Image (spheres, helix red, strand yellow):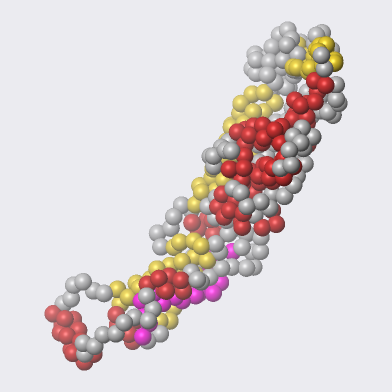
Amino acid sequence: MSNQDYYDTLGVGKGASDDEIKAAFRKLARQYHPDVNKESHAEEKFKEINEAYGVLSDKEKRARYDRFGKAGLGGMGGGYHDYTADFSDIFEDLFSGFGFSTGRRSRRSPRRGRDLQMQVSLTFEEAIFGVEKEIEFSRDETCSRCNGNGAEPGTTPIKCATCGGQGEVRQVRQTFLGQMVQTAPCPTCNGRGETISSPCTTCRGGGLERKKVKKKVQIPGGVDAGTQIRLNGEGAPGENGGPQGSLFLVLDVKPHQFFKRRDQDVILNLDINIAQAALGAEVIVPTLEGEDKLKIPAGTQPGKVFHMRGKGAPHVRHKNQRGDQIVIVNVAVPTKLTKEQKELFEKLAESLGTTVKPQEKGFLDWLNEAFGG
């Protein structure tokens, strides 16, 4: 795995769309493919480009890379992949003019539909425990009037006379390099292989109509903001009998009034008063599953960290494993005192004396302790 940033490798920004990433990959792959570029560094550069595309073209890998960098990929890393569909286009651009056979699929071959994406908002508790959500989204579906053939009922598409139903035409030219063959979409049928004399009044000959879809989805417990859930077969329809694409749900989690999240642990900042810190106490604290008791030992200092085992979020894939609830104690100093309280504090101050000493542990040490540093 190379050390270069994948976005820099492809020359795109972090907000680049899938199409921009693919276009950048195709351009660089043409430039550095070892069969074309004979410079000594071309093969290594080509592998870096391939590795970057392997991560950024995969929605799940890209999300993990954006959040955690290459460390977040683990065993999912880039590595070398053979992106046949993309390279077939590249090879066609490079070699078709010289009479080479690229094995490129016909335009009439089955093609998988596009993937779709939508955001789903969850409360903090829904993300922790899971929930069934009803989602609504729009997608293209096979036209209900013409059943997808694009022709008005009672009529049928006709095989294109120009391309013979292939959807593409070839032009042969003689050059000083020899015979060159170029392939292009058929200008008569626009690559469909068929012509329609009476287009469907619903889809206007396209074979698809836009529809709103409602679907109930089970969100597993333990998910977090940025988690993506893939619903196979819920994306755009395929072409020429190809499979339907996928729908990716990107989860957004609303903040909680008291709790914060760190992986499977939840964090709670808790205020106690001076007497509770000095004398010790048993206090009631909120948890994700209701109130529970927490014992505060005598002499507890500000920033003290307590772990309430098994009170955190469940693991998405291992439901029997849960994180902890981490309680960080803050000793609240009163800003207003009654006359009686003031007298008591004065007596306490007199008995404790005025001697001070440097702290052995500072605020940053407390933070490191709280977060396992």
Residue in the image at 85% along x and 16% along y = 178
Q: Seen from this angle, which residue lies furthest left?
A: 339
Q: Position of residue 196 (x, y in %)?
A: 74, 11
Q: Quadrant of residue 180?
A: top right
In reply to whether residue 184 is colored magenta, the answer given is no
Residue 113 percent coordinates (x, y)? 70, 32
Which segment did they paint magenta?
Answer: 299-314
307 magenta-colored:
yes
Q: Nearer the viewer, residue 79 or 244?
A: 79
Q: How many marks?
A: 0
Is residue 63 something one can see in this rendering? no
Q: In this image, 148 relative to 349: left or right? A: right
Q: Position of residue 125 (x, y in %)?
A: 50, 58
Where residue 19 sits: x, y (%)?
A: 62, 33
To which quarter of the image does residue 305 belong?
bottom left
Q: Is residue 36 above or below residue 291?
A: above
Q: Is residue 86 left or right of residue 369?
A: right
Q: Residue at x 43, y 58 (%)?
A: 256
Q: Residue at x 86, y 26 (%)?
A: 101
* Image side of residue 142 versus residue 311, left or right: right
Q: Nearer the viewer, residue 209 or 274?
A: 274
Asked whether 44 or 232 is in front, the reply is: 44
Q: Is residue 56 visible?
A: yes
Placement of 322 over or under 188, stated as above or below = below
Residue found at the very far bottom of the displayed protein:
351
